[in-house]
Amino acid sequence: MAISGQDIAKYAQQFLGTPYVWGGNSLKSGIDCSGLVQQVYKNFGINVPRVTYDQIGTGTGVSMDKLQAGDLIFFDSDRSTGGPDHVGIYIGNGKFIHAPRPGKGVEIADLKSGYYQDSFMGGRRVAGVEGGGVSGNWDPSGGTAEARLSPEELASEYGFAYSFLNSIPELKTIFGEYVNDNWSKERFMAKVRDSKWWQENSATQRQVQQMKSTDPATYSAQVDATKIQVQQLAAEIGAIIPPSKLGKIAAQVLETGASEDVIRNTLGSYVNFQKGTLRGQAGAYSVSAKKFAYDQGVTLDDQTVKNQAALIARKMATESDFKGQITQQAISAYPGYKQQLEAGQTIADIANPYVQIMAQELDLNPEAIKLTDPLIKQALNGVNADGKPTGMDQTAFLGRLRNDPRWGGTQAAQDKVMNVGYSVLKSMGLRS
C-alpha cells in the first residue's frame, strides 16, 4: 500500500524547531538535513540512505514544476564542491521543510526565494510514496496550480520595486521575460546589468530613481535638504541662484551624488553682481584682484573680475593664476622692470619715489596720485643713454614737474619767484 506524501509532509512538521546537529539522527534532540529525511521516512517504514549524496539517487526524478508533497528536493548550495549538499522534504505550495544549518532549527522555507530557486538541483519521488496530488502541487511557471510569488514579491527579492521596474520600459521588458520564462536570479541580474539604464546611471542615480518612483515623500524631503546645502554653498562663493533653478539643481545633485567640487562647478555660472557688488568669495576676490591690478598699473573691468571669480569658484583656476596674468600685463606695459616684477615687486613699489617727489613738488596728497598719471607713466618709461627703459632720473623728472602748469601755483614756485625778484632788485641797488 502506497504511503501518502501529504502524510509524510504533515509528520515532518511536528519537528519544527529541532536544533541542527551535524550528523545528528534524533528528531527531538538534534538532526541534520539528510538525517531529517531518513528519520521521517523511517517512521513510515521506508528506508533511504543516510547522506545527501546517496539520497539523490533514490526513486525517480521530478522537475520543479511537477513537485508534490512528500518529494525530496536537493540543492547545490556550495558551488565549490559540486553536487548536492542539502536536502529537504517538499510539503506543497512552493514550501519545503529542512534542517538548514548550525544555529537554526528545523524550519519551513520557500522554494520560490531567490537563493533556493537558484541552487535547486532537482526533486526525487521515493518508491512507495504516493504524491501529494493536485492540491499540493506548485507550478513555478504560473500554471493552473498555485502560482509562484507575485511580481511585486519577485521584484522586491532583487532589490527593486515592481512599480519602478514598470516605469522604465527597458527594465519592464527584462522583468517580464524573467517572470514568463522562469529565469534564474543570475540571468535576470545579468540582463539588468547589461541594460542601457544600468550602464548609464551610477549606483547613487539608480538608488535615487527608485526612491523617487516608490517613495516620493522621502525623495521630496531629501531634495529640500539638498536645496539648503546648495544655497549655503552658493552664498559662500557668491552665486545667485534664481528660485526657478534651485529645485532642478538640488535634484541633480541628489541624483548624481555630486561632490562639492562638482556643485561648485555648476554654481560658478551663477556668480553675478547684486546691486553692483559681488558677494561671498567672489566679492573678496574682486577687492583683492582690483587692488593688485591697481598696484601693477593694470585696469580690470567688472566683467573680467566676475569671469575670473566664477572660474575660481569652479576651481578651474586660482587667484595666483590671475595674479600671474596681471603681472604679465604689467611687464608688457613696463618691460624695463621685468626682473623686479618677476621677483615680486609691484609697479606701485617701483613708482613710489616718483610719487613722493611729485607730491612734494606739486603740493599733492601722495594717495591722490595715480599710476596712470601721465607724469608718472613718463617717469616709469624713461630711457637711459642707450635707449633702454630704465626709468627717468630724478633731476630730469624734477624738470618735468616744474614745467607742469600745476607747479606754478605751489608755494615753492612762489618762493622761487620772490627770491629771483629780490636778487634782481638787489643787483640794481634797489634793495640792500
Image: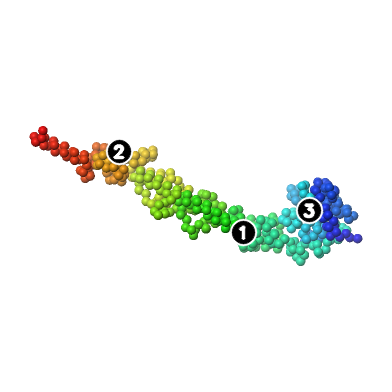
Q: How crowded is mark 3: few (under 14 residues within 10 Å), some or many (20 or more)?
A: some
Dot 2 falls on a residue whose secondary structure is helix
Return the residue at label 1.
215
Find the distance from the CA under tag 3 to the CA under tag 2.
Answer: 96 Å
Find the distance from the CA under tag 2 to the CA under tag 1.
Answer: 72 Å
Q: Which residue is drawn at 71% across and 62% down?
A: 150
Where residue 205 sits, quadrant-wise, is bottom right
Q: How crowded is mark 1: few (under 14 residues within 10 Å), some or many (20 or more)?
A: few
Find the distance from the CA under tag 1 to the CA under tag 3.
Answer: 34 Å
Please state which amino acid type lies under the numbered disc 3: Glu
Dot 1 falls on a residue whose secondary structure is loop
Return the residue at label 3.
107
N-terminal of the two: label 3 or label 2?
A: 3
Q: Position of residue 304 (x, y in %)?
A: 39, 51
Q: Which residue is drawn at 75% across and 49% down?
A: 78
| Residue 267 relative to residue 98: left or right | left
Dot 3 falls on a residue whose secondary structure is strand
Please state which amino acid type lies under the numbered disc 2: Pro
Q: Residues within 10 Å of mark 2 (few under 14, many from 20)?
A: few
| Residue farthest bottom in this picture | 144
* Mark nearer the viewer, 2 or 1: 1
Q: Which residue is drawn at 29% across and 42% down?
A: 365
N-terminal of the two: label 1 or label 3?
A: 3
Q: Which quarter of the image is occupied by the N terminus?
A: bottom right
* Mark nearer the viewer, 3 or 2: 3
